């Protein structure tokens, strides 16, 4: 990534993504209050990874984004409200903001997935239109904001990923069949946080399955193997 912006954390990109999303989906409530923003960040649906940020963590993220001019704070009634400033800072059109917001909220996606997921933010005419904006974001003179990832085995389309949290690390299958990690750039704190969140969620699900299984054994009167 060669833009002048520093690498953003997972939570900072989540905050930006939520602001860009809610601007289009709930315009009557935008700019957002801190409570609304926190709820959007911790939303269980349409988010990957799902996170559980605290109010203090969101405030810290807002402070960092405000320092970079990526958000604007205003007073509305008794609470401060927040709006994103993505287009002005990154010099991109609203269509590109919709794509980057969806990549920040849902992780890597194909052009087809982005077209469907961006429906409420911007209605792209077709997949080729999505691809045109992605290529434009990738070939910016000021520095790429997205990157096309290597095609996964069995996939018909390549996925795209935003670069606001740094370059990704992709996996490559070598002739021996062993999967090796090929660094496209440094692993960022945001990527580490995303991995930890996924591991934590899987551990919780495993614990719930184990509890359910033990209850079933007890109900059937069967000894655990």
Image (spheres, rainbow, N blue to C red):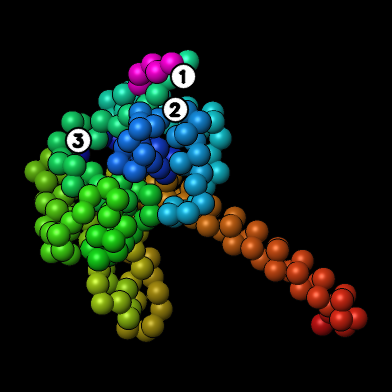
Q: Nearer the viewer, residue 30 or 142?
A: 30
Residue 185 visible to an observer of this rendering = no
Q: Marks 2 and 1, Cα distance to the nearest angstrom?
A: 7 Å
Comparing labels 2 and 3, the label whose residue is closer to the camera:
2
Q: Position of residue 110 (x, y in %)?
A: 27, 65
Numbered tag placed on residue 177 in the rendering = none
Q: Is residue 26 left or right of residue 58?
A: left
Q: Tell me which segment is drawn in magenta.
A: 73-77
Dot placed on the residue nearer the N-terminal end, 2 or 1? 2
Which residue is identified by label 2?
33
Q: Residues within 10 Å of mark 3 (few under 14, many from 20)?
A: some
Q: Main secondary structure of the magenta part?
A: strand
Q: Say whether marks 1 and 3 touch (CB < 8 Å).
A: no
Label 3: state its secondary structure.
Answer: helix
Label 2: state its secondary structure.
Answer: strand
Which residue is identified by label 3?
87
Q: Nearer the viewer, residue 205 or 26?
A: 26
From this viewpoint, which residue is outermost toward the left? 141
Numbered tag placed on residue 79 in the rendering = 1
């Amino acid at each position: 990534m060669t833009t002048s912006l520093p690498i953003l954390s997972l939570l900072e990109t989540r905050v930006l993504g939520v602001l860009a999303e809610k601007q289009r989906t709930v315009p009557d409530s935008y700019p957002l209050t801190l409570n609304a923003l926190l709820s959007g960040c911790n939303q269980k649906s349409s988010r990957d990874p799902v996170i559980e940020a605290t109010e203090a963590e969101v405030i810290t993220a807002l402070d960092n984004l405000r320092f970079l001019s990526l958000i604007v704070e205003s007073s509305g009634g008794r609470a401060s409200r927040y709006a994103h400033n993505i287009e002005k800072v990154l010099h991109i059109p609203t269509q590109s903001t919709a794509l980057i917001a969806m990549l920040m909220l849902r992780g890597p996606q194909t052009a087809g997935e982005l077209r469907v997921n961006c429906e409420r933010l911007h209605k792209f005419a077709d997949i080729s239109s999505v691809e045109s904006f992605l290529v434009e974001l990738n070939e910016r003179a000021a520095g790429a904001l997205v990157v096309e990832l290597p095609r996964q085995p069995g996939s018909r389309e390549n996925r795209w990923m935003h670069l606001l949290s740094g370059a990704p690390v992709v996996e490559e299958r070598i002739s021996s069949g062993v999967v090796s990690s090929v660094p496209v750039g440094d692993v960022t704190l945001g990527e580490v946080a995303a991995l930890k969140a996924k591991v934590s969620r899987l551990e919780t699900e495993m614990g719930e399955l184990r509890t359910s299984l033990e209850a079933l054994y007890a109900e059937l009167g069967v000894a655990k193997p």
